[in-house]
Amino acid sequence: MKKILYSVFMLATMVLAACSSDDTTEPVVKRGMVLKANVENTDTRATIDTVGGTWRFAFAMGDEVKVGNNQVEGYYTFKNNGTEFSSADALQTTKDATWYAYFPGETIDLRNQSGTLADVANKYALAGATATPTTGSAGLTVTMKAKAAVLRIVGVNKDEKLDISVKTADDGKYVSGFKAVKNSEGFSVETSDTKVSLLSKQGAGVYYVVVPAGVKISVSNGDKSLYSGDKPMSTTKADGLKAGKYYTLTTGMTKGSAENKLGETIDWVQLWPGGPKFAVKNVKEEMTWYDAATKKGDEYVWGANWRTPTADEVYGEGKLNCTWDENGFPITVDGSPSFELKEQEGYMTVVLTGVQPGYTKNTLTLYDQIKTNTHTFDFWTASDFKLGNDYRGVLFNIEADKDNNGKLKIKTFGLNYVNYKDKKFLVRPVLAE
């Protein structure tokens, strides 16, 4: 059963009374309110529930909420001091009224978002109303609910430009923001006839953008469609995205295929944003570093569509990487693809699996080469390293051997700088782009 945490706005009133010297009684003016706040699907400031696909939220010091009712034209501003919201100007009504609350205000500018979780929290539209009309004399209870969705946009290509815009499908206009609908529990979508960029970034990475929910929209990166999985996504369904949910889109494909000069169609897979697009199999025969690293274009073993990756492309933070357990064996490090020894069809393999958004279903298998009784899963890079008076080829090196208990475990994981360039190793090409 879905667990929903409902947030409650409790507004208590502070009373100021006015009297005249001639005992003529004026109407009592009750001004000033205090507001204690939580929100549906509360958690920390900006949190993603990866199981339910839900965006979670909590208020922070300095947040403002606009509160109005059907007896006043404008809105009162309540500000959070860390424990509660307060407004010195808010007035109780003389007659029962329905009160409406809006976060972060009655207008929300969605242009030029920074792409961070913090910025999403600052623009995350919430609205709610009192369950029954009231003057507010006994305080107000308002349940705030999400009125927007969040796009998690993954830039897949190194150095690519992101220019994200959103259009409403009914009139083809560009989304620019939200505006509270007076005396309702919602916002209208503000649009523009001229292009509006919701996010402008340079380079691969993961970015977050607030967008409308409940209306059919289209999302573009410049003049290109984005991808949901590895299928182009032009528009949402008629009822749009669900409020309070997040959706992952990529700027390009993370899996695909390309031909080599032998007439074969080779599948490829990418494991992290901006990373190389690895062939799913090795070149058939082992090669020297010279043949793997120096031959380009049509002279390359698989032709111009493929090349050998550099060491910097393959290994490092957020790329293939590791840390070490208490016994000195390499283990997966946060933010980099996981790695695991697996037996497949009687042979040992190392399976690499993407962990970053958009890549968690992407795997790459490295195959065993049994040498000197050690299981190895190596491939050349196009980099070299000066060792003494000569240069050696840089190998990406994984080795597995039995531990003291006889269990086969990975014992080395990373770059190896000591191999002569005329020595032959396998090659795992990447897509040439």
Image (cartoon, grey):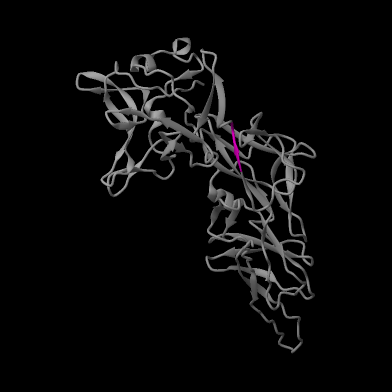
Q: Nearer the viewer, residue 359 or 81?
A: 359
Q: Nearer the viewer, residue 328 or 78?
A: 328
Residue at x 40% of width, y 17% of height: 285
* 31 over 62 or under it: above or below: below
Residue at x 68% of width, y 82% of height: 17
* 203 over 89 or under it: above or below: above
Magenta stretch: dominant SS? strand
* x then y, percent, for residue 284: 43, 19
* x then y, percent, for residue 169: 76, 39
Q: Nearer the viewer, residue 420 or 137?
A: 420
* 188 over 62 or under it: above or below: above
Q: How many marks?
A: 0
Magenta stretch contains residue 371: no
- What residue occupies the far left of the structure in this picture? 388
In which quadrant of the rendered view does residue 94 lie? bottom right
Horizontal side of 301 relative to 82 (left or right) equals left
* x then y, percent, for residue 36: 60, 70
Q: In which quadrant will I find the N terminus?
A: bottom right
Span of residues in magenta: 248-252
- What residue occupies the far front of the structure in this picture? 346
Horizontal side of 44 relative to 76 (left or right) equals left
Residue at x 65% of width, y 33% of height: 231
* x then y, percent, for residue 81: 54, 65
In which quadrant of the rendered view does residue 317 lie? top left
Q: Nearer the viewer, residue 409 or 207?
A: 409
Horizontal side of 77 relative to 398 (left or right) equals right
In which quadrant of the rendered view does residue 29 lie? bottom right
- What residue occupies the far top of the structure in this picture? 299
